[in-house]
Amino acid sequence: MLAKGRVLAISGQIGWNERGALVAEDFPEQALQALRNVIAILRAAGGQPEHLVRLTWYVVDKGEYRDALSALGRGYRSIVGEHYPAMTLVQVAGLLEEGARVEIEATAVLP
């Protein structure tokens, strides 16, 4: 499907809260907070979760991702709903923020 509208590029979000502190040490909580941060930025720009067209997940351990799939699925649906944009998972050697386990960047097309 061809999407038409304004393109919104959301830079990588990690699992930190509004005070700039990581919400937890564990992967699932960090991942869900990062996703909440993506959606908060999307909403601030006037978008909704269904406007997402791409998510790229950068993880430091793909095993942690696999182990958390059930919790991630439940959390994803509670945050994003039943919308599933194109997604890519990339394992990286590390992230810039000390203690960060996952970073999510997104692209949305706003009407």
Image: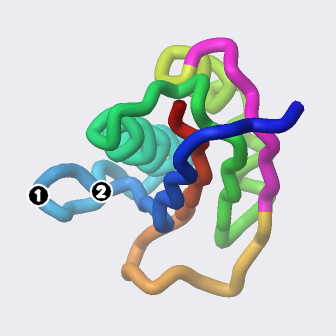
Residue 67, percent from left and from top = 75, 42
Residue 103 counted in the magenta span: no
Residue 32, percent from left and from top = 48, 39
Mark 1: amino acid: Arg
What is the number of the mark on residue 19?
1
Quadrant of the image containing the N terminus: top right
The residue located at (29%, 50%) in the rendering is 23
Residue 83 counted in the magenta span: yes
What is the number of the mark on residue 16?
2
Q: Which residue lies furthest to the left in this view?
A: 19
The residue located at (51%, 15%) in the rendering is 78
Asked if labels 2 and 1 touch by Cβ distance under 8 angstroms, the answer is yes
Mark 2: amino acid: Trp
Instruction: Name above or below for residue 67 compared with residue 78.
Output: below
Q: Which of 65 and 84 is in front in this view?
A: 84
Magenta range: 81-89
Q: Which of 57 and 67 is in front in this view?
A: 57
Instruction: Name above or below for residue 17 compared with residue 5.
Output: below
The residue located at (61%, 52%) in the rendering is 107
